[in-house]
Amino acid sequence: MSKRWLALCACVMFLTGCMHATKANFPRHYTLGTAAPSLDDEHHPANARGGILQISSITVPDWLDGTAMYYRLDYRGDNRLSAYANSDWIAPPATLLEPLLQRAVVAGGGWRAVIGPRNPATADASLQVRLDDFSQVFSQPGQSHVIIDATVTLIGNRDDVIAQKHFRIQVPASSADAQGGAKALGEAAGQFAARVQQWLQTATVAAPTR
């Protein structure tokens, strides 16, 4: 009886250890959440005489065309880009940014409608975004910040460039790990969307009369 009891206890301990090991190595999937500013207090109604703006699919370099969460150890000075082993995004950064940007532009008003990249409607202008950096940077072993680096171009319906602006957003991370980086990138994404929305309000858009 005692041998059976010992065997049962050993089995339970083994399974418990496996559960803890599995939990410790289970990958964590992050999102930007509701990073875009709500702007409810400053919401401007749609302009019935305004044009239709289409937000095109965000383009990225090859290394950002995936769900990996990247970081750099700048204090080493080797310019090496690394990815967290057990943490990633639930979708590529460009896919996560697109709806945040669209909501911010809608909240800013001035347009009759703001549509996404897969909407078949004919637009008066398109907003093209080139995302060149979306990563966490460690300046010291326990100190990091995140960077969003992007160029935004407003294109008319005749493929003419109306305006262009480069944005570089930098936000400190609350912790030197993937969780801190994800939280800071969510905040940076919100700042990016808000700044693009403000820039669009100052850009001159000559929407053709329909």
Image (cartoon, helix red, strand yellow):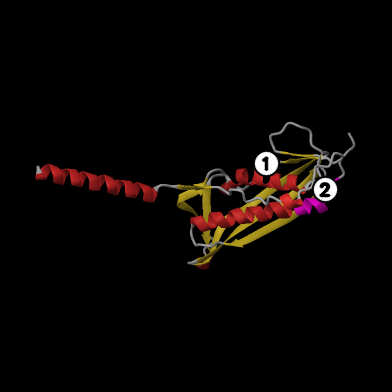
Front residue of this view, candidates 116 and 136: 116
Q: Secondary structure at mark 2?
A: strand
Kindly indicate the quadrant of the structure image that contains residue 98.
Answer: top right
Does residue 68 appear in the picture of this structure?
Answer: yes
The residue that disc 2 covers is 162
Number of numbered discs visible in the structure rendering = 2
Q: Residue at x 72, y 49 (%)?
A: 40
Q: Which x, y percent locates residue 183?
A: 55, 55
Q: Quadrant of the N terminus?
A: top left
The residue that disc 1 covers is 57
Which amino acid type is shown beneath numbered disc 1? Ser
Describe residue 45's horizontal placement relative to residue 178 as left or right: right
| Boundaries of the magenta span | 198-205
**Residue sticking out furthest to the front:** 41
Dominant secondary-structure state across the stretch colored magenta? helix
The relative height of residue 163 versus residue 157 in the rendered view (above or below) is below
Describe residue 95's horizontal placement relative to residue 11 as left or right: right
Q: Residue at x 14, y 44 (%)?
A: 5
- State yes or no: residue 203 in magenta: yes
